[in-house]
Image: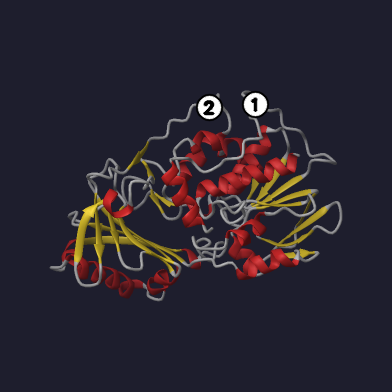
């Protein structure tokens, strides 16, 4: 069963995806223990999984350090506030499960979470399908089915959520600009080496970097990872990733616009109303693309890239409506990000390979992130947070 099939079944049954719950949060913040012989933990990466893992360790009173390659936290949930009057999510954007995932990530019933979200009106919100010759308009419910349950953050983003509820408890524990190049777990003391030659020691390490980093050999392991994990890393299909946001004078597009190649094993392609549910007067159309469809845009740049997208929209809607109403745009090419190198694992991946990616090693190395799961779900922010919870559960025993 692949991820697409699993999520479809969950939607039909009306159930949420499983969340591990062995860790019980303390209502009062735990007094953090100093680094000691038995509880030295390093986390590699300050994306959603790394931040979630650190937050859960803090709840358990276990000291830790997060090593982040970039000068900031967030990874593939970064956003920008400079393009319009609400945050534009350049990476992970939607909540793909019920919004009860938010308190589950926080894992503390004493914390009041006030994050407005909104789903789509399946009966009234329009969708469009362009078959190459003509545009067919329909409702979202008829187009995607009654189990379409994506939620939008209203006036915020995944990054805002982590900044508000997770970051305050872990910010002092993050060290930035520390790309990791080697992990030696051959002895009880694991030695982690940074690009600048600096070393760190621990007896537990949570690897929370995008799987493409491992696939590209950017971190060397001693001893080598087991053959089955090496094979899974080598063969896993990580899609290219591209997003663009276009500001227009008028709104001429539906909530979603699909194509024949919108969701295939080769990749994804979707235009969508990025300003949906936002308190804004701006008309912002988003372009979300992964896999081979994304590479079409990535192979262009500058005005050529802009004009290609505008022409694509003019072809769909006619009368040069996109070109005539264009104001400005921004793009995000995830393949060009030095510590991402792509988007995420294809939705059609073999769940058995994903499960191998997520398996811990020798009670020393633990893996957390949207790719390192139990094989039931992957390639989303909530999957990254859940994998962090599983990794911490295994680490604390």
Residue 212: which quarter of the image? bottom right
Q: Residue 133 falls in which quadrant of the image?
A: bottom left
Q: Tag 2's secondary structure? A: loop
In this rendering, does residue 32 appear at all?
yes
Circle 2 packing at 10 Å, graded few (<14), some (14-19), many (20+), is few
Q: Which mark is residue 111?
A: 2
Mark 1: few/some/many CA within 10 Å (<14, 14-19, 20+) = some
Distance from Cα at disc 2 to Cα at disc 1: 11 Å
Does 279 sit above or below residue 230? Answer: above
- Residue 156, given in percent of the width and then of the height, sits at 40, 41
- Position of residue 282 relative to residue 24, above or below, is below
- The answer to whether residue 111 is above or below residue 99 is above
Residue 370: percent from the left, percent from the top?
A: 56, 53
Rendered location of residue 134, percent (x, y): 19, 68
Q: Residue at x 31, y 45 (%)?
A: 85
- Residue 178 visible: no
Q: How did the renderer colour the structure?
A: secondary structure
Task: Pick the residue in front: 129 or 305.
Answer: 129
**Viewer-nearest residue: 90 or 198:** 90
In the picture, the disc for residue 26 is 1
Please identify the quarter of the rendering in which residue 257 is found: bottom left
Q: Secondary structure at mark 1?
A: loop
Left or right: where does residue 13 sit relative to residue 86? right
Q: Residue at point 57% right, 36% down?
A: 168
Whether 327 is drawn above or below 396: the answer is below
> Which residue is the extreme one toward the left?
319
Tell me, for residue 18, which label it has, or none: none
Quadrant containing the C terminus is top right
User: Dots 2 and 1: beta carbons under 8 Å?
Assistant: no
- Quadrant position of the N terminus in the picture: bottom right
Question: Which one is earlier in the sequence, the residue at label 2 or at label 1?
Answer: 1
């Amino acid at each position: 069963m692949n991820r697409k099939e699993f999520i479809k079944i969950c939607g039909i049954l009306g159930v949420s995806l499983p969340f591990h719950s062995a860790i019980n949060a303390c209502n009062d913040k735990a007094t953090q223990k100093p680094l000691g012989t038995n509880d030295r933990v390093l986390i590699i990466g300050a994306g959603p999984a790394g931040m979630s893992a650190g937050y859960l360790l803090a709840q358990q009173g276990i000291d830790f350090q997060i090593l982040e390659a970039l000068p900031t936290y967030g990874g593939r949930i970064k956003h920008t506030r400079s393009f319009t009057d609400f945050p534009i999510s350049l990476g992970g954007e939607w909540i793909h499960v019920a919004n009860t995932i938010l308190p589950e990530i926080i894992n503390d019933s004493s914390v009041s979470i006030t994050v407005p979200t909104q789903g789509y009106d399946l009966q009234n919100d329009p969708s469009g399908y362009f078959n190459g010759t003509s545009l067919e308009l329909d409702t979202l419910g008829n187009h995607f089915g009654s189990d379409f349950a994506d939620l939008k953050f209203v006036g915020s983003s995944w990054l805002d959520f982590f900044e508000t509820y997770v970051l305050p408890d872990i910010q002092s524990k993050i060290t930035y600009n520390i790309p990791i190049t080697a992990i030696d777990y051959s002895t009880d003391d694991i030695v982690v080496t940074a690009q600048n030659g600096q070393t760190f020691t621990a007896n537990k390490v949570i690897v929370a970097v995008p799987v493409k980093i491992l696939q590209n050999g950017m971190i060397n392991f001693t001893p080598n990872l087991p053959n089955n994990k090496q094979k899974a890393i080598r063969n896993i299909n990580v899609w290219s990733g591209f997003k663009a946001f276009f500001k227009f004078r008028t709104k001429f597009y539906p909530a979603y616009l699909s194509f024949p190649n919108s969701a295939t094993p080769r990749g994804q392609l979707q235009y969508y109303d990025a300003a949906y549910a936002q308190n804004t007067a701006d008309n912002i159309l988003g372009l979300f693309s992964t896999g081979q469809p994304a590479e079409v845009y990535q192979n262009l740049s500058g005005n050529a890239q802009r004009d290609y997208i505008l022409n694509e929209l003019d072809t769909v809607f006619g009368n040069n409506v996109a070109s005539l109403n264009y104001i400005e745009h921004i793009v995000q090419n995830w393949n060009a990000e030095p510590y991402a190198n792509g988007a995420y694992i294809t939705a059609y991946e073999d769940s058995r390979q994903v499960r191998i990616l997520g398996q811990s090693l020798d009670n020393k190395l633990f893996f957390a992130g949207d790719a390192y799961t139990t094989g039931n779900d992957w390639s989303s922010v909530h999957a990254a947070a859940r994998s962090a919870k599983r990794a911490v559960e295994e680490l604390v025993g």
